Image: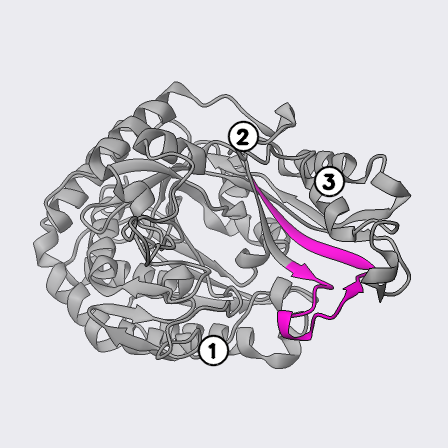
């Protein structure tokens, strides 16, 4: 098969159909349940599901079946099923994965941009969710449609598009139990919810970190009091919280202190990090929007990463644990902050875990460490603690390595690259346990500056087109 035969179909489909659909999708504030407790009442997730399913049903793909499946009290999902072509049989399948729920708004958007305001500029579609991960269903069915239009033999294809991935996929186990018997014998998982080191070749994800999330709350008083009267006698809840965080990571280096939160890095992953580091160089750390200094003799200075070594940087963000404070409550804004010693402080914590560390055990450990022996006998709790285990891909089959390289060469003129990712897709670990013999092509369009989850998030449209063509090439290689 020559991918150049597919590109006109795929490019036209993106320009005439997918981009307009994704523009409409960006407008929907379909926030994941973790960020919108009233998601069902608000109806935005339902609207995203209904629009995507209606589009899918309208596609001219022979034998395509599309279902919206709901379980009471759970977010809905889309399941699609397309029979094999040219006599390849129905037992061996390719499973596509994506999601339609989104992260919350986040502050800091450029003045003319916004999370629910789609803007196309310089080949990029700005707005929340198009690249993470609204394009996945549209791209997957475009892959199938393009292969069928050129009469290229392909296996049976099924797809699962969920709507709680950004909340850690808490509803997914129920759907997986319900639908897995319909998946068939999965030969390849094509997950379209990952990143890419650059926009110049196909990037295949080899591992994903796990995640522990929760809220640390420290209470010292029943109500706020005059800081002049109480400070020096009543300990600051913020200082106690800061002291508790010091139990988790080294304040100077950021290294996580409990050894149980670390894991040995496989030699193959180290070798892949070296290869990716040679390709990317300083892009690994320069892709982020560092704060610059605009005055004085060091006018070109900027804040610096923990390391500028590309290999160490890749390993830090893919195989080493890291703690972040992603939110806070009970701290008034500066304009309304009086001389009051606040009664309590709450911090939302996000701990990224090495791919092979068990998420639930890590969550239990984190809770024990934070709540043990509270300073000053303050009331300390780590609530809403939840863990998701990461994922480490099985050894890559020779056919997949060959197919990925060939597809990347055809779409970009460069071979495929292999790299771990720092994010979490709980579905991959669940699926890896259920289908241990499957191969995984986890990939995506979240490259430099795309800023998933943050302000000014964008979808690189040309990368989406090329990725769709490359995935088509790999799918056609499954036998």
Q: How crowded is mark 1: few (under 14 residues within 10 Å), some or many (20 or more)?
A: many
Residue 64 percent coordinates (x, y): 36, 65
Is 373 displayed left or right of 94 in the figure? Answer: right
What secondary structure is found at the residue carrying circle 3? helix
Looking at the image, tell me whether mark 1 or mark 2 is earlier in sequence order: 1
Q: Are marks 1 and 2 in contact (CB under 8 Å)?
A: no
The residue indicated by pointer 2 is 356
Distance from the alpha carbon under mark 1 to that under mark 2: 35 Å
CA–CA distance between discs 3 and 1?
39 Å
Q: What stretch is highlighted in magenta?
A: 328-352
Q: Which of 400 and 125 is in front in this view?
A: 125
Magenta-drawn stretch contains 9? no
Mark before the other along the chain sequence, 3 or 2: 3
> Which residue is drawn at the image coordinates 16% and 38% (left, top)?
415
Q: Is residue 341 rendered magenta in the image?
A: yes
Around disc 3, counting alpha carbons within 10 Å, would you say few (fewer than 14), some (14 to 19), or many (20 or more)? many
**Label of residue 28 in the image:** 1
Tell me whether circle 3 and circle 2 mark residues in contact (CB < 8 Å): no
Query: The C terminus is located in which quarter?
Result: top left
Answer whether labels 3 and 1 touch (C-beta < 8 Å): no
Q: Nearer the viewer, residue 10 or 312?
A: 312
Q: Can residue 27 be seen in this view?
A: yes
Under circle 1, the secondary element is: loop
Taking the image as shown, residue 298 lies to the left or right of residue 291, namely left
In which quarter of the view is residue 465 placed?
bottom left
């Amino acid at each position: 098969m020559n991918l150049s035969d597919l590109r006109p179909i795929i490019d036209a489909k993106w320009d005439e159909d997918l981009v307009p659909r994704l523009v409409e999708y960006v407008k929907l504030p379909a926030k994941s349940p973790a960020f919108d407790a009233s998601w069902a009442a608000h109806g935005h997730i339902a609207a995203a599901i209904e629009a995507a399913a209606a589009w899918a049903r309208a596609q001219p793909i022979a034998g395509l079946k599309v279902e919206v499946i709901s379980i009471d009290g759970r977010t809905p999902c889309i399941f699609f099923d397309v029979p094999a072509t040219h006599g390849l049989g129905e037992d061996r399948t390719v499973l596509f994965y994506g999601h339609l729920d989104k992260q919350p708004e986040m502050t800091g958007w450029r003045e003319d941009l916004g999370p629910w305001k789609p803007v196309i500029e310089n080949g990029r579609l700005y707005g929340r969710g198009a690249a993470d991960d609204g394009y996945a269903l549209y791209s997957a069915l475009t892959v199938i449609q393009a292969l069928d239009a050129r009469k290229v033999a392909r296996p049976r294809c099924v797809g699962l598009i969920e709507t709680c991935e950004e909340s850690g996929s808490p509803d997914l186990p129920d759907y997986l139990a319900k639908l897995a018997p319909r998946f068939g014998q999965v030969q390849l998982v094509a997950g379209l919810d990952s990143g890419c080191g650059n926009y110049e070749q196909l990037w295949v994800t080899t591992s994903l970190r796990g995640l522990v999330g929760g809220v640390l709350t420290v209470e010292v008083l029943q109500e706020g009091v005059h800081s002049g009267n109480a400070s020096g006698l009543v300990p600051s809840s913020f200082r106690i919280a800061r002291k508790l965080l010091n139990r988790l990571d080294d304040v100077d280096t950021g290294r996580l202190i409990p050894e149980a939160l670390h894991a040995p890095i496989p030699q193959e992953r180290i070798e892949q990090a070296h290869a990716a580091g040679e390709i990317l160089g300083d892009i690994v750390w320069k892709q982020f929007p560092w704060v610059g200094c605009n005055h004085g003799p060091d006018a070109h200075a900027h804040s610096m990463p923990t390391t500028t070594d590309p290999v160490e940087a890749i390993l830090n963000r893919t195989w080493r644990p890291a703690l972040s404070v992603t939110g806070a409550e009970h701290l008034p804004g500066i304009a309304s902050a009086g001389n009051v010693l606040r009664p309590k402080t709450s911090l939302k914590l996000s701990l990224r875990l090495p791919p092979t560390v068990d998420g639930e055990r890590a969550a239990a450990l984190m809770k024990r460490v934070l709540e043990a022996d509270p300073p000053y006998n303050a009331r300390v709790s780590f609530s809403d603690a939840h863990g998701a285990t990461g994922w480490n891909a099985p050894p890559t089959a020779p056919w997949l390595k060959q197919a990925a390289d060939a597809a990347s060469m055809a779409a970009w003129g460069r071979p495929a690259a292999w790299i771990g990712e720092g994010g979490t897709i709980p579905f991959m670990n669940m699926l890896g346990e259920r289908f241990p013999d499957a191969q995984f092509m986890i990939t995506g369009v979240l490259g430099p500056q795309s800023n998933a989850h943050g302000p000014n998030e964008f979808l690189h449209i040309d990368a989406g087109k090329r990725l769709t063509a490359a995935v088509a090439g790999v799918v056609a290689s499954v036998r």
